[in-house]
Image: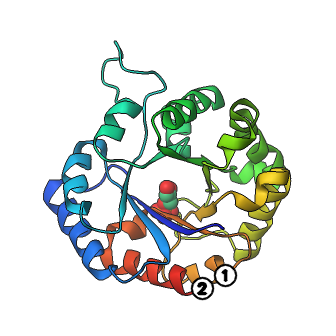
Amino acid sequence: MRRKFLAGNLKMNGCSSSICELVDAITTRSKNFHDCDVVILPPYLYLNEVSLLLEKSHLSLGSQNICQFNNGSYTGEISAEMISELGCDYVLIGHSERRNFFLETNNHILEKVKRALENNLTPILCVGETMEERAAGQTENIIMDQISSTHDYIGISQQEKIIIAYEPIWAIGSGKAASENDVQDVLSSIRRNLETIGDSVTLIYGGSVNPENAQAIFEQADVDGGLIGGASLDEKKFVELARLLQEV
Ligand code: 13P
């Protein structure tokens, strides 16, 4: 049985005090929402502080990235083992901002998924197409290509431990989410392509989700939740999204 799932990707925003205030407010306001898993993904630097704040709450902690290598001589990097020790249960892997700005390929992403699973972290694997790819009718191929390298490598049993976030690149930060029908089409095609395990994989949508458009998206049959960027920086909006998700 799939659980509803909402994650707030704070990206590279905030400072120690603003993030602690935000997380404190989200924790207090969402304490009665037990029907969905809520995860906060702060910048690396604040994981420890947020971890302490979340200790007695029902919210979970995740990081926005990990290194594809185990501990060693990789200056400036952070390993899966390190974030696991800090109390993270989840890690975002392959966000389009990492693919675009930091040139991460499907191979890097596969290695990161492996490191995550080896360290008992649940990877939230981000996939999505550009507007040009969509216009050329390539959405399904692009997305299955992004998923299949991990799918082929880690095999069917582990695949169920991955959450897949469909984030069309053209919708992220644009203020205009994909329509609920487009979201449903893509997520149902992912489930179909994952064949026997399709029904057990948690699939979420991200890209300009806000309290105005969320209900229509969350109501779709194959949508298990959301990956929230901008609206996760506003506690009222993020808590409202958790409430809407728990009630659909
Ligand atoms: P926005 O909600 O700001 O569009 O960001 C989505 C996202 O990239 C979450 O990972």
User: What is the image's colouring?
Assistant: rainbow
Residue 140 horizontal side relative to residue 179, left or right: right
Q: Quadrant of the C terminus?
A: bottom right
Q: Which mark is residue 101?
A: none
Q: Element under label 2? A: loop
- Residue 202, given in percent of the width and then of the height, sits at 64, 60
- Residue 144, given in percent of the width and then of the height, sits at 78, 45
Which residue occupies the extreme left position in the image? 17
Q: Looking at the image, can residue 188 be seen?
A: yes
The quadrant where residue 45 appears:
top left
The quadrant where residue 109 appears:
top right
Q: Is residue 37 above or below residue 50?
A: below
- Residue 132, given in percent of the width and then of the height, sits at 74, 49
Task: Count neighbours of disc 2 (C-alpha within 10 A) and say few if under 14, some if 14 to 19, many if 20 or more.
Answer: few
Q: Is residue 108 above or below residue 89?
A: above
**Three-letter residue code for mark 2:** Val
**Three-letter residue code for mark 1:** Glu
Q: Is residue 76 above or below residue 216?
A: above
User: What residue lies at 25% left-to-right and 78% top-to-bottom?
Assistant: 28
Q: Which mark is residue 248?
A: 2
Label 1 sits on residue: 219
